[in-house]
Image (spheres, rainbow, N blue to C red):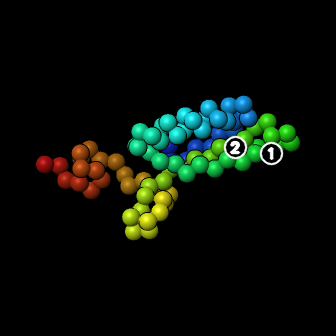
Amino acid sequence: MLGETSVRVNVPRDSLTEVLRRVTDFMGFGIYVYSVSIRPAPNELLKEFVVELQRVDFSPEKRAWVPFVEKGATDSPYGPGGATP
């Protein structure tokens, strides 16, 4: 599911550290960056956590990470709006 704009999964407590390690390893490639939110799942004994990922991009104007906005797809090697030679 990594690569999606947003991801939400319920994770057993014993797997939480492995899930977070995999997310940070994935972000280490530098292709996608996510803000990460972790909270207890709605049960009593903290046996499960909800992990939410929101894809973000860095905004030089705001000097902060902002939610990712899909700009469309193109066949141009120069990205959306780019002209092909």
Q: What SS does tag 2 mark? A: strand
Q: What is the residue that sits farthest to the left in this orientation?
A: 85
Q: Quick check: 40 above or below 25?
A: below
Q: How many marks?
A: 2
Give the left or right position of residue 70, taking residue 51 as reference: left
- Is residue 69 something that shows in the picture? no
Per the model, the C-alpha gap separating discs 2 and 1 is: 9 Å
Q: Which of 10 and 70 is in front in this view?
A: 10
As rendered, which of 36 and 10 lies closer to the eye?
A: 36
55 lies left or right of 42: left
Q: Position of residue 39 (x, y in %)?
A: 72, 48
Q: Contact (CB < 8 A) between labels 2 and 1?
A: no
Q: Left or right: where does residue 61 sit relative to residue 55?
A: left
Q: Residue furthest right?
A: 44
Spot occupied by residue 66 in the image (x, y as percentages of width and height): 49, 60
* Marking on residue 33: none
| Marker disc for residue 42 | 1
Residue that appears at 47% across and 42% down: 27
Residue 57 in sight in this render: yes
Residue 62: percent from left, percent from top: 44, 68
Residue at 17% over, 49% down: 84
Q: Position of residue 13 (x, y in %)?
A: 73, 35
- In primary-sequence order, the first of circles 2 and 1 is 1
Where is 64 relative to 51, above or below? below
Camera-nearest residue between 50 and 22: 22
- What amino acid is found at the position of numbered circle 1 in the picture? Pro
Q: Which residue type carries mark 2?
A: Val
Q: How many neighbours does mark 2 have within 10 angstroms: few (below 14), some (14-19), or many (20 or more)?
A: some
Q: Which residue is drawn at 39% across and 68% down?
A: 61
The circle drawn on residue 50 is: 2
Disc 1 crowd, CA 10 A, few/some/many (<14, 14-19, 20+): few
Helix, strand or loop under label 1: loop
